[in-house]
């Protein structure tokens, strides 16, 4: 199970999640990726998620929840908590969505995720 919690909202069974802390704007190594299926095509799934979310943002089509509290991501027994980050994810219906802490630059965080995932795929081709 891959779940995201923020404020009073719980998203169950996300298929893929990219966690982009604010410090990832300057240092991409802080970006984390999680997926329910961990196989050879996972990195391509993250690339598609990051790129599509960025393009949808540019076209004002990406639904972004602005949150004030902690964003919590649970993956099996592992749990991540973030108070200054963006989480880009694919929900149960297959839609691309994101949540970001109030005051953070959503565009820059999406750009960082897109660059990171694009380079990751290119390095392995």
Image: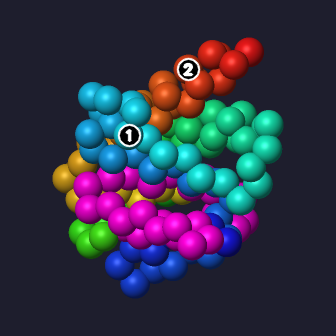
Residue 38 can be seen in this image: yes
What secondary structure is marked by label 2? helix
What secondary structure is marked by label 1? helix
Numbered circles on residues, count: 2
Residue at left offset 40%, top offset 84%: 8
69, above or below 60, in the image = below
Question: Residue 77: x and y, percent?
Answer: 57, 73
Foreground tag (1 vs 2):
1
Residue at left offset 59%, top offset 25%: 120
Residue at left offset 79%, top offset 44%: 39
**Label 2 environment density (alpha carbons within 10 Å; few <14, some 14–19, many ≥20):** few
- Disc number at residue 117? none
- Disc number at residue 30? 1
Q: CA distance from mark 1 to mark 2?
A: 15 Å
Locate residue 30 relative to residue 33 in the image: left or right: left
95, above or below 74, in the image = above
**Magenta highlight range:** 71-96
Q: Earlier in the sequence, mark 1 or mark 2?
A: 1
Residue at left offset 59%, top offset 53%: 34
Question: Residue 28: x and y, percent?
Answer: 39, 31
Residue 95 can be seen in this image: no
Task: Look at the magenta stretch and give its main secondary structure.
Answer: strand
State yes or no: residue 94 in magenta.
Answer: yes
State yes or no: residue 50 in magenta.
Answer: no
Locate residue 86 relative to residue 90 in the image: left or right: left
Question: Residue 36: x and y, percent?
Answer: 71, 59
Q: Quadrant of the N terminus?
A: bottom right
Residue indicated by mark 2: 119
Extreme residue toward the front, this view: 77
């Amino acid at each position: 199970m891959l779940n995201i919690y923020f404020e009073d909202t719980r998203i169950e069974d996300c298929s893929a999640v990219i966690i982009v802390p604010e410090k990832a704007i300057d240092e991409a190594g802080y970006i984390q990726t999680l997926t329910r299926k961990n196989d050879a095509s996972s990195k391509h799934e993250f690339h598609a998620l990051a790129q599509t979310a960025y393009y949808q943002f540019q076209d004002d089509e990406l639904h972004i929840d602005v949150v004030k509290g902690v964003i919590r991501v649970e993956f099996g027994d592992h749990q991540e908590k973030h108070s200054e980050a963006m989480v880009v994810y694919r929900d149960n219906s297959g839609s691309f969505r994101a949540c970001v802490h109030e005051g953070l630059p959503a565009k820059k965080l999406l750009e960082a995720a897109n660059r990171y995932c694009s380079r990751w795929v290119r390095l392995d081709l």
